[in-house]
Image (cartoon, helix red, strand yellow):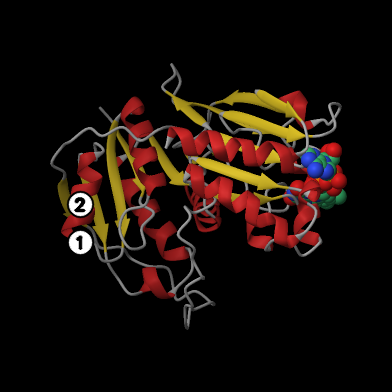
Amino acid sequence: MSEILVLVDHSDGVRKPTLELLTLARRLGEPAAVFLGRCAESDVEALGSYGARKVYVADAPEFDDHLVTPAVDALARLAGACAPAAVLVPSSLDGKEIAARLAVRLGSGLIIDAVDVEAGPEGPVTEQSVFGGAYQVKAHVTQGVPIIVVKPNAVTPEPAEVTPVVEQITVELSPAAAVKVVSRVPRERSDRPELTEADIVVSGGRGVNGAENFALIERVADALGGAVGASRAAVDAGWYSHSHQIGQTGVQVSPQLYIATGISGAIQHRAGMQTSKTIVAINKDADAPIFELADYGVVGDLFDVLPQLLDEIGKRA
Ligand code: FAD
């Protein structure tokens, strides 16, 4: 069976999107994780628990202090050496750039932001939403090694314990890239899950009507163990930080559950959330477009509905 290369997303350990990619890779062939940087034993164990039969490790300072080119060098070298049936890359800003550059290097087809991947007669078949979410398409790559960027939450990670073979590789790196990272400042973090990786996202829009009222959205998110999102109208009004904006010009999320409160459902907002598995909308206007894509809708004032929701969650906690 051919290998499926999975680029490992790691910082303080292997991150959840990698476990999702390994779960998908098992449908396509033999998962082989590509770990760039210092790989701890616990990282190898984490990768093995989700079915990575092999872990390729390349460690060099360049993976840390240069932008994406060293990762492209490593993946290109491996793609040449082991002829994988596909390369799966997590959908981060870096991931997308690495995948795009790799596709150019290998002369391969590239699929960005798949929300599902299945084995097909002519290679992996992906599902993704295109044109701002107006269409769901199935696609497969017709040239070269398929390079597929997969959105977080495309699949629930399923454990499949194996003991991986670890292979250290040396990579001939391209001449020093023009840009070098000289320092890193960790982003301020809350205890809430990372927005792009969260299973549950609770979002507020213009209907929330003020920065102080976002405390209610946060309470619902915390009660459900979710992350907080916002529409651009709420962000532009200064009620919530831009890093939480969901949509075409913000973050794209695909959680198991997306709760949109006081959000009308403009096309640019949908572009960032409509691949969510279950969508709940709370809006006082029964004709709001968000109800067209909601699985469950509540027509009502969010300041009446959310406290009741919190009560119900509390009873079940
Ligand atoms: P509105 O459209 O004003 O809707 C507010 C909703 O709240 C209404 O439906 C109303 O009925 C409801 N409401 C009011 N009070 C209550 C209440 N008490 N209880 C319940 N419901 C209530 N938008 C994004 O979100 N993300 C993007 O990335 C994005 N990118 C854009 C890029 C471009 C190039 C452009 C042109 C626009 C972009 N927009 C984006 C903006 C987008 O077009 C909308 O203007 C925006 O999404 C509207 O936000 P909203 O739904 O919160 O506000």
Residue at the (67%, 63%) spot, across then down: 241
Label 1 is placed on what type of residue? Answer: Ala
Along the line of sight, the residue nearer the viewer: 242 or 311: 311
Circle 1 residue: 40
Q: Nearer the viewer, residue 70 or 163?
A: 163
Q: Picture quarter containing residue 157?
A: top left
Question: Hey, which residue is sitting farthest bottom in the picture?
Answer: 182
Image height of 252 relative to 60, above or below: above
Q: Is residue 116 above or below residue 219?
A: above
> Which one is in front, 71 or 235?
235
In which quadrant of this rendering is ligand 1 seen?
top right
For the residues bearing labels 2 and 1, Cβ distance under 8 angstroms: yes
Q: Residue furthest top?
A: 121
Quadrant in the rendering for residue 9: bottom left
Residue located at (41% from left, 45% from top): 17
Alpha carbon of mark 2 to alpha carbon of mark 1: how far? Answer: 7 Å
Q: Which mark is residue 44?
A: 2
> What percent of the width, then of the height, locates residue 283?
78, 35
